[in-house]
Image (cartoon, helix red, strand yellow):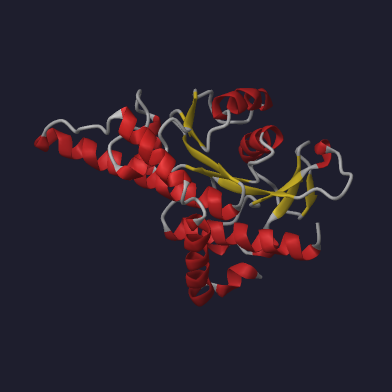
Amino acid sequence: MTKADEAALRRDLAAAYRLAARFGWDDTLYTHFSVRLPAGKGARRGKERFLLNPFGLMFNEIRASDLIVVDLDGEVVEGSAPMNPAGFTIHSAVHSARADAHCVIHTHTVPGMAVAACEQGLLQLNQISAEFYQSVGFHAYEGVAFNLEERSRIQTALGENMALILRHHGLLSVGATVADAFCIMYYLNKACEIQLAAAQLASIAGPVTRIPPAVSSYVRKQFRGVEHERQIVWAAWLRELERTQPEYQW
């Protein structure tokens, strides 16, 4: 990996934090996003590292140079700021189990946590939720994620899915790039927002209707055919950030 490669990943992850603040996904100093740093030639898997936000900065002030580098043993190998231990548990669990999960996004949004409290989880109520049909895992709540033994259960719950609902806790998405993971989270959170709105309307407008399974399966395949569009959406978001918050890149 070259310095240019790491610089690009730093800029993308810092952009994700700034965009999350803009969309109202932040939770003061809590929740966390990470991106794996490609290992050098011949590096052992145990030497893998990932970028994580330093504990103490708000999402709307994170810059590329602020991000710390953490290894899979929980050591901060670059940067002097402390890390969130729960963040290490969750992100190291995913990075160590999924070679394709280069970026991991975890949020505590109100709609995400509301759906995480529902017994049936994410319902098939709209076109957006259909993208996630049979593609979301569920992980039972065990308390604040300080226990490293929880990692194996997070890995099992996530499986090969692109997202995970952590019961009574929040949402998690994974992707091959920051753009992929962030766009997945954007629409997963949007689907949760719609479900919350539909539940509120149901009290006065009557029961909501669900998309039939066969249709949801078909729509999911349609979405798979246009996943490349996430990069186009991401590029548009970056242009907006460069106009309004160019310091995120520093």
Residue lying farthest to the bottom in this orientation: 243
At horizontal 57% and vertical 31% (from top left) the residue drawn is 160
At horizontal 86% and vertical 39% (from top left) the residue drawn is 44
Residue 234 seen from this side = yes
Q: Position of residue 200 (x, y in %)?
A: 20, 38
Residue lying farthest to the right in this orientation: 42
Q: Is residue 102 left or right of residue 230?
A: right
At horizontal 41% and vertical 39% (from top left) the residue drawn is 220
Q: Is residue 238 left or right of residue 177?
A: left
Residue 28 seen from this side = no
Q: How many marks?
A: 0
Q: Nearer the viewer, residue 129 or 146?
A: 129
Q: Nearer the viewer, residue 164 or 59?
A: 164
At horizontal 45% and vertical 28% (from top left) the residue drawn is 167
Q: Nearer the viewer, residue 54 or 187?
A: 187
Of the 4 image quadrants, the one containing the N terminus is bottom right
Q: Is residue 245 positioned above or below 17 on the image?
A: below
Residue 14 occupies which quadrant of the picture?
bottom right
Q: Position of residue 216 (x, y in %)?
A: 34, 35
Q: Position of residue 19 (x, y in %)?
A: 49, 60
Q: Is residue 179 positioned above or below 153 on the image?
A: below
Q: Nearer the viewer, residue 217 or 241?
A: 217
Q: Is residue 122 positioned above or below 236 on the image?
A: above
Q: Position of residue 49 (x, y in %)?
A: 76, 45
Q: Is residue 21 positioned above or below 168 on the image?
A: below
